[in-house]
Image (tube, helix red, strand yellow):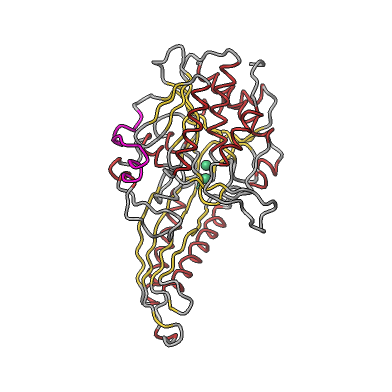
Amino acid sequence: MTTLHINITRLLRELHHLATLTDCPPTTDATLPTPTTAVTRIVFTPRDLEARAYIKSLAESAGFTVRTDAIGNTFLRFPGSDPTLPAIGTGSHTDAIPHAGMYDGTVGVLGGLEAMRSLKESGFQPHRSIETLIFTSEEPTRFGIGCIGSRLLGGVIDPATADALPDRLPEADPQAPTGLTLHDVRTAAGFTGSLSTVPLPPNYYHAWVELHIEQGPLLEREGISLGIVTNIAAPASYRYEITGFGGHAGALLMPDRRDALCAAAELILSVERHTLAANAASGTADSVATVGTVAVHPGAVNSVPSRVTLMLDIRDTDVTRRDTIMAALHADIRAIETRRHITITEQQINADIPAVSDPHIVATLEAICQSDSVSYKKMVSRAYHDSSFIARVAPIAMLFIPCRAGVSHRPDEYSTPESIALGTRILALTLSKLANE
Ligand code: HGY
Ligand code: MN
Ligand code: MN
């Protein structure tokens, strides 16, 4: 389809407007290469609702239909000539973790919308309907688990369990729940239906392709234009409560201490040690683990920490290897408890399986890249995505564009207009091919 024209000026204008819908003041973080505006857009906050309304208005102006489900997943639809057929899906998320960039997720949503618009403007009429989705709550920031909207669509989380998830706004202590639940927050934001209506019916999608920035350095480092994702690493996350015995920083002598933060430090280093060992044993870099939040109680300079709460995020393309790391950590936890006379409790938040891309969709993406003389490489996604859970109910694949120095989840996250335009073009050609098969 040589007549296809991606209106990159329009797409960039919309991406930049969306970035202004942020709860983050302009960043003056001196460590960043260029002072830039960071994006904070937490699910179900006024900013999130503004972003949804903005994109829905763009879709309606383009003549697409819009519907929203009970959790707020939003479906922008380009009706096909046979709307009864299983559709073709694309899309991503517009929520953003605190102090993040403007391209994570949004390129997949606005790029999907632009792909549909440019196809329509080229006179293309799909046989199968094409949909661009805005998923609710891809980031784990507020409710502790990622991809709630796509987990519900894929039947991966029980609706009642989702509704009962505790709300933890990051402005407060990240571990401290607000006392509200997801049900309270979503209904206050206007999403009042029953979550049991969210799961997709069988064969809702014929095929699914998500466009996303790589969030890693490989494409840019190797000078390759696009990544075709063959599988998505499996995320797991855990919450640990470490309880010791507090006291006065001056009067409580070292032999008498049961310092919860020192115990936490041992646990964190144990995570790193066993993950590095797993990579050394496998000869890969496929095991990754992060402790990204630590809350210390009472959190006073002259008080021995009595309680620490921390979150572990651990991922691997191989679930058995991930479980082996966890088993080694559990052994260390027992030893730390005994030696330090403290207690450590573990709560598993999620432990997912890897997603595997559909060979036919991968081949379709490859053929289109080849016919368009676009360089590409097949690769693993280290980040998880909503496609990880749509994969439970539809054949999926993902298309990556390079991002500068692989930076993501930071205000200086960046992808060039050329990459965004090319990714959107290949997405549009792929959607049109899949829609007419
Ligand atoms: O954490 C992730 O992989 C995704 O960016 N939420
Ligand atoms: Mn993200
Ligand atoms: Mn993302």
Which residue is at a point 30% across and 47% down the rendered structure image? 164
Q: Nearer the viewer, residue 341 or 275?
A: 341
Q: Quadrant for the N terminus, please.
A: top right
Instruction: Tell me where residue 375 appears, x and y as whole percent.
Output: 68, 31
- Whether residue 255 is in magenta: the answer is no
Of the pair 330 and 225, the residue shown nearer to us: 225
Q: In which quarter of the image is residue 173?
A: bottom left
User: Left or right: where does residue 4 sit relative to residue 340?
Assistant: right
Q: What's the magenta region? A: 183-200
Asked whether 196 falls inside the magenta stretch, the response is yes
- Toward the viewer: 284 or 428? 428
Q: Nearer the viewer, residue 7 or 287?
A: 7
Q: Where is residue 265? Give x, y as percent.
A: 48, 69
Q: Tag count in the figure?
A: 0
Residue 200 place in picture, x, y as percent? 36, 29
Most extreme residue toward the right is: 223
Instruction: Tell whether 148 sits left or right of 301.
Output: left
77 over 136 or under it: above or below: above
Name the quadrant containing residue 401: top right
- Residue 402 locus on image (x, y percent): 65, 39
Taking 418 as reference, is 239 above or below it?
below
184 shown above or below 266 = above
